[in-house]
Amino acid sequence: MRTRRCSAPTWRCRGATNSPTTRTSSAARAGDRTVDEEENVESSARQHFERACELAARLAAAPADAEAARELVELTQQLAADADLLDDAVLKSRARDAAAAARQLIGKPDAALAKSLSQVLAPPAAEPAPAPAAAPLPQSQAAADRS
């Protein structure tokens, strides 16, 4: 069995809406895969991350949803274990931060905390685009005067 090692996953949360697709369980989504798709730590971590994003969006909309908060605690603990196996310290830290925030929401629902929780699981900001290359310098003063 061949296993790839991935140093920096570029997963993104799926749309944070209340559509029926965001409320499906990971088990239901697993049935949609083809038979030859291999289950491995990376695909498991991706599924856990996507489900965590869905739950964070659900909590942002309804911070008092203790069931979603409990599920998110369990899921982020699994995600932290996946990140440990993938040797991804950034993902592991984000998963632990999300688990801590979700635990706080179970005891004391708070809209601001729920919003910050979804930001913890948000994809990292894209790096700024490189500056455009400067135009080449003219070869002579006469060429500079023409432009």
Image (cartoon, helix red, strand yellow):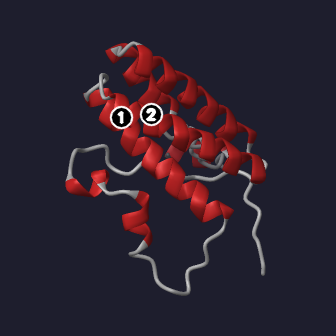
| Element on which disc 1 rests | helix
Q: The disc labelled 1 sits on which kind of residue?
A: Glu
Q: Position of residue 139 (x, y in %)?
A: 69, 51
Q: The disc labelled 2 sits on which kind of residue?
A: Arg
For image coordinates 76% across by 53% down, the residue present is 85
Badges 2 and 1: C-beta atoms under 8 Å apart?
Answer: yes
* Most foreground residue, 105 or 60: 105
According to the picture, the residue beneath numbered tag 2 turns out to be: 70
Q: Horizontal placement of 120 versus 105: left or right?
A: right
Q: CA distance from mark 2 to mark 1?
A: 5 Å
According to the picture, the residue beneath numbered tag 1 turns out to be: 67
Q: Position of residue 2 (x, y in %)?
A: 78, 78
Give the label on residue 143, or none: none
Residue 105 shows in the view: yes
For image coordinates 78% across by 81% down, the residue present is 1
For image coordinates 44% across by 69% down, the residue present is 30
* Residue at the limit of the structure toward the bottom, as seen here: 36
| Element on which disc 2 rests | helix
* Most foreground residue, 134 or 7: 7
For image coordinates 75% across by 46% down, the residue present is 84
As drawn, 30 above or below 119: below
Q: Position of residue 98 (x, y in %)?
A: 54, 30
Question: Which quadrant holds residue 89?
Answer: top right
